[in-house]
Image (spheres, coloured by chain):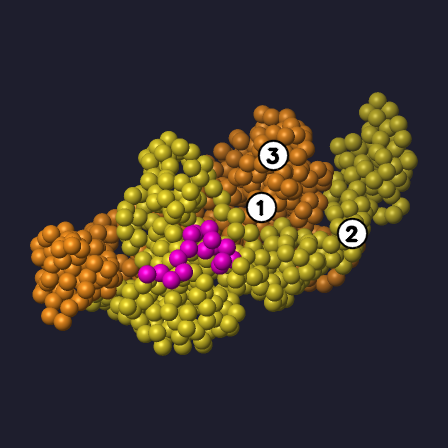
Chain colours: A yellow, B orange
Amino acid sequence: MFKRFSGATQAKEVLLAHCPPIMRTCSIACSEAAGRAVSQDIVSPVSLPGFDRAAMDGFAVKSEDTKGARPSAPVFLERFLPVRTGMEVPSDYDAVVMLEDTRLRADSLEITAEVHAYRNVSRIGEDITRGEAVFREGHVLRPPDIALLSALGIGEVQVYGRPKVVIIPTGGELVPIGERPLKTGEAYEINGLMAKLYLEKWGCDAHKLEIVSDDSEKIREAILSNLDADMIVIIGGTSVGEKDYAPRVLMETGELFVHGIRLQPGKPTAFGAVCSTTVVCLPGYPVAALAVLYQFVRPALKKMAHLSDFLPQIPVRLARKIPSRPGYLSMVRVALKDGEAEPIMVSGAGILSSVARADGFVIVPEDLEGFEEGETVSLCLFE
Amino acid sequence: MFKRFSGATQAKEVLLAHCPPIMRTCSIACSEAAGRAVSQDIVSPVSLPGFDRAAMDGFAVKSEDTKGARPSAPVFLERFLPVRTGMEVPSDYDAVVMLEDTRLRADSLEITAEVHAYRNVSRIGEDITRGEAVFREGHVLRPPDIALLSALGIGEVQVYGRPKVVIIPTGGELVPIGERPLKTGEAYEINGLMAKLYLEKWGCDAHKLEIVSDDSEKIREAILSNLDADMIVIIGGTSVGEKDYAPRVLMETGELFVHGIRLQPGKPTAFGAVCSTTVVCLPGYPVAALAVLYQFVRPALKKMAHLSDFLPQIPVRLARKIPSRPGYLSMVRVALKDGEAEPIMVSGAGILSSVARADGFVIVPEDLEGFEEGETVSLCLFE
């Protein structure tokens, strides 16, 4: 029997409570900082533009000289300077007349439009003023943000560290991917690779250890020698069988918060901690492991990384009824077909081809017994 | 004046028509193939599982021996084999009785549940059968797909090549980022970095050249020496000024399809081709460049890369009216505030801080004159 069996919502709260945002910081080159959260307010050392800048191709003029100019009553100027977009408008001038409204004469400039002061001029500091906070602590940098920092001459930024995650695959029947042909009874260790690819996508530094056999002492050692990680993800051996060591090791070595979750698939899941390292035990069945990664590990790591855990949802019509076990949160794989969501109903959490055929998943909350055919549901695409 | 002025929808069609999906392929390691489109059907060389596999911890039995077993009438077996989840069920047996329904005696196994043939057994080929097409040509691989391929012993896959894009920043006033302090009238070349970061995010191999001065011969040379690229992105010099060489060079050296688009911001944009390389001329104003990247370059490159150009949209209520120029497609930056979209109304396409303050954008289609306060609109988050 599971010792600390929990509802899915409650289990998520417990996990998130043990995953505080990472407070260590590092300084990195701006050009490498896309997707990172800045760890302090960034204040501009300069104004942008740093000078009054022409916003149009044309002629810099004194606006007072242009009074009354119009096509039927052109004005002829002697004080003017040809400028291109982006060039300085020197302090002798205060506006730019567009090229289209001018004709250059031998000894003067004919203009057919009046301009007010600072017309077609980007004034010094118009975009950013010196000393202004450009980004607040916690802002996640996107490519245009990095362009802006570069424009200000800021080459390095302080950002929060990425969560360090160590993945420990367990199971005596497992063989490293591609190492040698399988014998009967063996399988390649694929969950570790799947977890690593997702953790990297979600903003972590993920390191996968070699396979640990079903031996509580070895699992304990693997945990204890990786306590510099923010999170340890143990895969396999999480159920209540004789050789399901992982949760027991957690209980003996640190704390076990949750063991067994009303999540379908994904029931044999455990959360705990050893010292300040959070430990998640994923089920060995790949579809169950995937469900736990999405429902629990993703929001926990996004919180640690100071990132939003927003997952885009698309409203779609259900082509067929989805039944669901009451009290359980269910992650149902669905394929998009002619704009409708077709549930992929296979029983086994070991059937990875059901994910290969799925475009995404629909979550049935704990308080529902499923969705009816024709209902509009929210589809999350697999990333 | 612009020579081939176009509506935004029409311009996009023209560009996409000149951006066929890339047909060259390459073979890469599965573990590196996340996000890539496979270039041929992938057929499984093996069955998965490769043997009849226990789906539960318990005992392998002959189902016929278990007839009638129930708690009140246990059956005692002499033929049985202890198995753990994932282990082989040898051919002498055809079902697994769960551990919970058994008690091991000194000379027999007491069972309290009847099992039918193949109960709690994952049969050979249940997930994938040998010779089955696992993925069809064009499928974009996600982490669980890579896990599945690895489970099948497939270590390499044929995928379509990534679009090769060469970025050519132009402008005599530009200085490479961080090279030296700026003099008055100069600016750092930031659009090239922004474009490169987005193109890489969108699945391309992007290579940025050094800044080319405003000189039609040098721009021509830069184009001609990069015709092995699938797309060339020229930044700056795209308007109709005296020194706006890029579109003219295109017209003289290859073809100019579009010059000037009813897009706000982003009007001075050009599309063309030299030999079979598509050329996009982006405006030098960063917000305009960003609009063109999202509205045109992104769908074009996603098509070339065999990827979906789906961009998640969130329905939000507008906190204030958005006006828009009729006939123009407008990309309006908005900030999310208390769950509502607050338009950021700044006139200049040079004001990059308007993007820094924005969470995303709302598109006003060409046939609308804007949106009213309180309307529900679709927000796209900046990636």
A138, above or below B270, in the image: below
Which residue is under mark 3? B317
Q: Residues within 10 Å of mark 3 (few under 14, many from 20)?
A: some
Left or right of B178, for residue A91: right
> Residue A314 location in percent, x, y?
46, 39
> Residue A330 location in percent, x, y?
38, 47
Q: Which residues are magenta?
A: A1-16
User: Which dot, 1 or 3, sits closer to the camera?
Assistant: 3
The amino acid marked with disc number 1 is Phe
Which residue is under mark 2? A129
Q: Nearer the viewer, residue A55 or A271?
A: A271
Q: Nearer the viewer, residue B270 or B222?
A: B270
What whole-number distance in Å separates the C-alpha atoms at marks 1 and 2? Answer: 24 Å
Which residue is under mark 1? B382
The amino acid marked with disc number 2 is Thr
Residue under the image location 55 percent in, 52 percent down: A308
Left or right of B310, for residue A25: right
Q: Residues within 10 Å of mark 1 (few under 14, many from 20)?
A: some
**Residue A75 falls in which quadrant of the image?**
top right
A210, above or below B195, in the image: below
Q: For residue A5: magenta?
A: yes
